[in-house]
Image: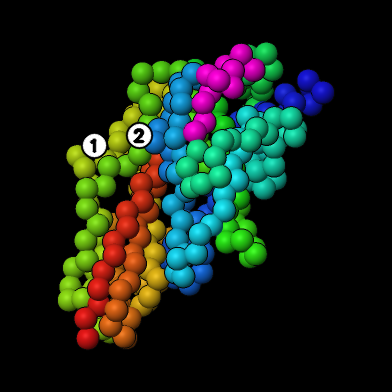
Amino acid sequence: MRAHLLVLAGVFGLLGCAESTLPVESALTDYRVLGIVADQPEVGPDAQVALTAVDFDPEGRPAGYVWSACFYSLGSRAKFQCADPSLEIPLPGAGPTTVLDLAALDFEARFEAAGPLVGLDGQVLSLDTGVDVTIGLTAGIPGQRATRMYKRVRVRRGDAPNRNPTVTGFEVEGELRAGREVTLRVTYGDDTPETYTEVQTGRAATERLLVNFYADAGELADRSPFDESLPDTTWTTPDEPGPAVLFAAVRDGRGGLTVLRRDVDILP
């Protein structure tokens, strides 16, 4: 069993555990989970991490939530299956938030006891270079099909952990009247995108931010994969006046995520 877990953990270390992907522009016509935000996407092995599901239901129905953490996931190719059922741990809470307490779960001792863990590239996995804990969330409206989402929390020793992108504004540029074309734009703080040192190579790198926009009414412009890094898009407002809800989700490609919401009123 030990050798089996070492191979599976190696697969986990190579593939990582990113969030499941969503369409670049999405119409919020039914219940959706837009992402899971960790208050710290990269932490030390004895830290606590608060996690929040950013979800939306156009009918305002209450959702149910079940959280779990997997120390050794098989990654996206295996639909983030845990290497062994005993390695999947339920997390507290039945609401949109939970806490991963690595110290209480004795994560570092468990990791060291399972080692050495070797990836498919032959490199030994280490807390000095970082390993991923997979957060799983099953959420949905009771009586309907549930959504399954995953979130990567990077666990690493070090003094410069990754942070979520700093988004200072989410603006609508244009006249908010029915059937008009307006621009949605996010603005970043001075520390976003981050320049960081790659742990394995020691080289400097700069994050490439990806932005997803969502709306529960009207129509968002189609964007190609090359447009995902742009901080703006075009939204055609709904033909009828009334309230509308907009979201912008900014990802840094390293587990960091920030989601902003705007509630607007469309005039005739």
At horizontal 58% and vertical 35% (from top left) the residue drawn is 91
Q: Residues within 10 Å of mark 1 (few under 14, many from 20)?
A: few
At horizontal 56% and vertical 45% (from top left) the residue drawn is 94
Residue bearing the label numbered 2: 163
Which quarter of the picture shows residue 177? Answer: bottom left
Q: Toward the viewer: 54 or 5?
A: 54
What amino acid type should be assigned to the residue bearing mark 1?
Answer: Asp
Q: Quadrant of the N terminus?
A: top right
Please check the rendered image and state whether residue 57 is part of the magenta-colored stretch, yes or no: no
Q: Report helix, strand or loop for mark 1.
A: loop
Which percent across, then down, holds residue 166?
A: 27, 42
Q: Residues within 10 Å of mark 2 (few under 14, many from 20)?
A: many
Q: Which residues are magenta?
A: 99-110
Which percent across, then down, holds residue 222?
A: 40, 71
Q: Nearer the viewer, mark 1 or mark 2?
A: 2
Query: Which numbered disc flags the more N-terminal residue, 1 or 2?
Result: 2
Residue bearing the label numbered 1: 191
What amino acid type should be assigned to the residue bearing mark 2?
Answer: Arg
Q: Is residue 74 above or below residue 114?
A: below
Q: Is residue 33 above or below residue 101?
A: below
Which percent across, then down, holds residue 206?
A: 33, 37
Which quarter of the picture shows residue 228? Answer: bottom left
Answer left or right for 197 relative to 94.
left
Which percent across, then down, holds residue 132?
A: 55, 31
Q: Mark 1 touching mark 2, by CB under 8 A? A: yes
Q: CA distance from mark 1 to mark 2?
A: 10 Å
Determine if residue 265 is in view.
yes
Mark on residue 166? none
Q: Report helix, strand or loop for mark 2.
A: loop
Q: Is residue 118 above or below residue 25?
A: above
